[in-house]
Amino acid sequence: MSGVLEICELGNPVLRCCAAPVNNVRQERIQNLIDNLIITASQANGVGIAAPQVGVSDRLFIIASRPTLRYPNAPLMEPTAMINPKIINHSHETIKDWEGCLSVPGIRGLVPRYQAIEIEYTNREGELCYQQLTDFVARIFQHEYDHLNGIIFVDRVESTQDLVTEVEYQKRITDFHGFR
Ligand code: ZN
């Protein structure tokens, strides 16, 4: 079975749970979940999605960065499943930038994140991978990683004044790029 999964929204208790480690990456349930998360993120125009967002409390997420209307400057990469991910080191420096979330429709927030991180995860073939991520992709990783610990980006804004609606956000980036 493969297809688009229903996305849980802010207020659903599953988004506040600490997800459980995945023991066997090769099991069919996990492989199907990965396929369906990739389809779901793509259909929803997301650049990442974590298993708890579809009601599955497993430590697993997809990063699928690509330029979209919502993130015009995103780098293009193959959708990548990261299982049992860990942040093993991070820059001192943090950067604030706008984030949204498929589980929090219509809202954007200015969120501080580490500029660079060193990470470890198991890929869908079961191999342990090590990578350094910077800027936008590092931001996606930290956003998705938070989902595995029951944290949502609105928890990370420094002030509620750093929350805006999607409509107001679109006005700002349009102004910024000078398209009007
Ligand atoms: Zn999210």
Image (spheres, helix red, strand yellow):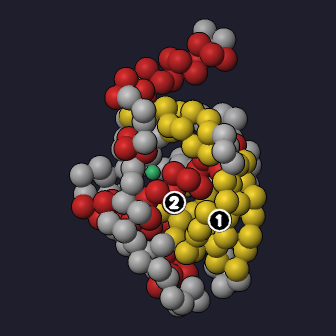
Q: In the rendered image of this protein, does residue 139 appear above or below residue 23?
A: above
Residue at 66% across, 40% down = 93
Residue 145 is labelled as: 2
Q: Name the front one of labels 2 and 1.
A: 1
Q: Determine the image quadrant of residue 165.
A: top left
Query: Left or right: where does residue 165 sit relative to residue 127?
Result: left
Q: How many other residues sit within 10 Å of disc 1, few (<14), some (14-19) or many (≥20)?
A: few
Q: At numbered mark 2, what does the secondary structure look like: helix, strand or loop? A: helix
Residue nearer the viewer, 38 or 131: 131
| Residue sitting farthest toward the top | 180
| Residue 170 shows in the view | yes
Circle 2: residue type: Tyr
Q: How many other residues sit within 10 Å of disc 2, few (<14), some (14-19) or many (≥20)?
A: many
Residue 97's x, y, as percent? 57, 33
User: Sequence-wise, which precedes: disc 2 or disc 1?
Assistant: 1
| Residue 40 shows in the view | no
Query: Left or right: where does residue 106 sit relative to residue 66?
Result: left
Residue 88 is labelled as: 1
Residue 6's x, y, as percent? 35, 61
Residue 132's x, y, as percent? 75, 58
| Residue sitting farthest toward the front | 92
Which quadrant of the rendered structure holds the C terminus?
top right
Residue at 57% across, 85% down = 25
Query: Left or right: where does residue 7 sit relative to residue 99?
Result: left
Residue 20's x, y, as percent? 41, 77
Q: At numbered mark 1, what does the secondary structure look like: helix, strand or loop? A: strand
Residue at 51% across, 23% down = 170
Q: In the rendered image of this protein, does residue 24 appear above or below residue 121?
A: below
